[in-house]
Amino acid sequence: MSGERRRRRSSSSSSGDSAGSSGERAGVQRSERSERSEGSSGSRVDGERRRSGGGSSRRRRRGRRMWLWLVPLVLGVLALLLIPWWNERGLRVAEWQLESGDAAGALATVDEYLETQGGTESGLALKARVLVKLGQPAEALRLIERVGAASVPEMRAYAQASLMLQRWTSALPVLEHLVKLEPADGDLLHELSACRARLGRYDESIAAAVQFSKLPGNEARGFTLIGLLERDRGNNQKCAEAWSRVLELRPDAKDLQVSAAEFFQEYGKALLLTGDASKAESALVRGVSAGESAAALAWLGKAQQQLGRRQDSERTWLRAVELEPLNAMAAEGLAELLMQRQDFTGALARLQPLEEQPGLRSSTGFLLQRLYGLLNQPEKSAEWKQRTEKLRRAEEALVHMEQVIVSSPDTMWGRVYQAWYLAEQDNRDQARELLSPFVKEGAEPFIMKLWAALRDGTPLPGPEEGPLDVF
């Protein structure tokens, strides 16, 4: 019994030991697996850390490589931008000098720039602008025609140079373009108006003058310009109206495009031609006071004559011929007064110095015709009758020419007559430019005569040689 219990205890003990050993082994195995698992996890973390560290390193290396080529690129671009800017500093200085009114200094600066940098377009264009300011339009135009006019200041220089050289047809389209760009520029509007008038485009010229007069500060100058244009196209009533407005704005007629003396002379003349001799005399007296001239005195004498003040008119005309012995209006007035006194010899003596003068008027010719007749010189009287008829036809043809130019400036005859006027003003280059499209086989004789005179430098055909039925 006891032996049996001992065997059971021994067996139980062996079983316990065996179970304990098994438990210990299982624990050891779990511990090893755990350690392996932890080791494996640690290895993965370390690997990830190593990979992460390697990626950052590669990114840093790529960043450094990018900067290595990006910095030189940026520096190169900056150099490309800054080098021209630095090289053109001389032009900026010259521009500043020009705007400050130092055109001579600007020319020296721009010449130095062109010598060191070569004949760049910007340098030559600026030099052209400077030359215009210095009154050298021909050289300025040569430079602009070489490099072109790309900016507003360059286009203005081209237009101004063309105006200075009386190249009206060249200046006109540029001025019209500039006014579209800068419609409130008074100088441009004034230049455009004057240029159009030179080409006989009086309606368009007056439109620009009206636009000019509406600009703040330009009212008086604008109405002065309108009056001048109306005078030139023979509309004395509108001329007088415009200048009456000027005197409301500037009673002393100062700071206008013309002197006070010239303003009052022309205003008085317009008033006299519209039949207002009293107002005309007042204006002309102011003109003579502002600046005595034979022309103003001649018109003043005419006003005094119309007012019935013969002695005053005689004194005034005598003073006029004192200043200008060949003043036709004063000489005619004095001759008429002498004829009224039956002093025909004295009257003839007043007019004879005018006989061979250019621009002789038909009114002078008529007086000479009468005087030679009164002095019993029939042959001379007949000669002057023929000359007077020719002078009258020329004057009528001239009026006809002006009417065609004013009313139809873009027609063939409008342009032909413009060419004649330009040639009459010694602007033969512009005259040839206007006339050339109409020179062809079968052209009107007047056109061919005018072309031959322009080509050969011979005297122009008289206006009476042109047709009188061109409307």
Image (spheres, rainbow, N blue to C red):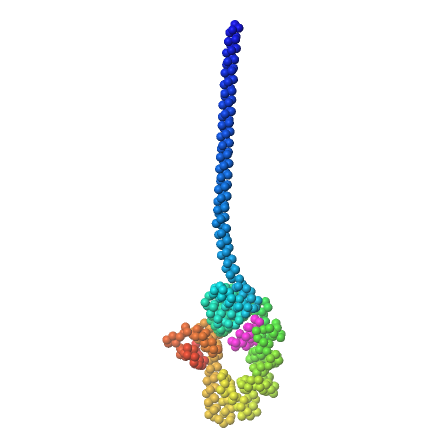
Is 300 drawn above or below residue 171 in the view shown?
below
Q: Which residue is the extreme one toward the left?
A: 441
Between 404 and 383, the one nearer to me in the picture: 383
Q: Could you tell me residue 30's position as x and y percent?
A: 50, 24
Is 17 drawn above or below residue 258 in the view shown?
above
Residue in view at x 53 percent, y 90 percent: 349
Between 161 and 444, the one nearer to me in the picture: 161
Judge whether residue 235 is colored magenta: yes
Could you say which quadrant of the image residue 435 lies in? bottom left
Between 7 and 241, the one nearer to me in the picture: 7
Q: Which residue is the extreme one toward the bottom?
A: 376
Q: Is residue 330 visible?
A: no
Q: Could you tell me residue 380's position as x and y percent?
A: 47, 91
Residue in view at x 59 percent, y 71 percent: 220
Residue in view at x 54 percent, y 70 percent: 104
Read off the magenta span: 221-241
Q: How many marks?
A: 0
Q: Could you tell me residue 84's position as x and y percent?
A: 50, 59
Is 376 drawn above or below residue 456 in the view shown?
below
Quick one: quadrant of the C terminus? bottom left
Q: Could you tell me residue 387's position as x and y percent?
A: 46, 87
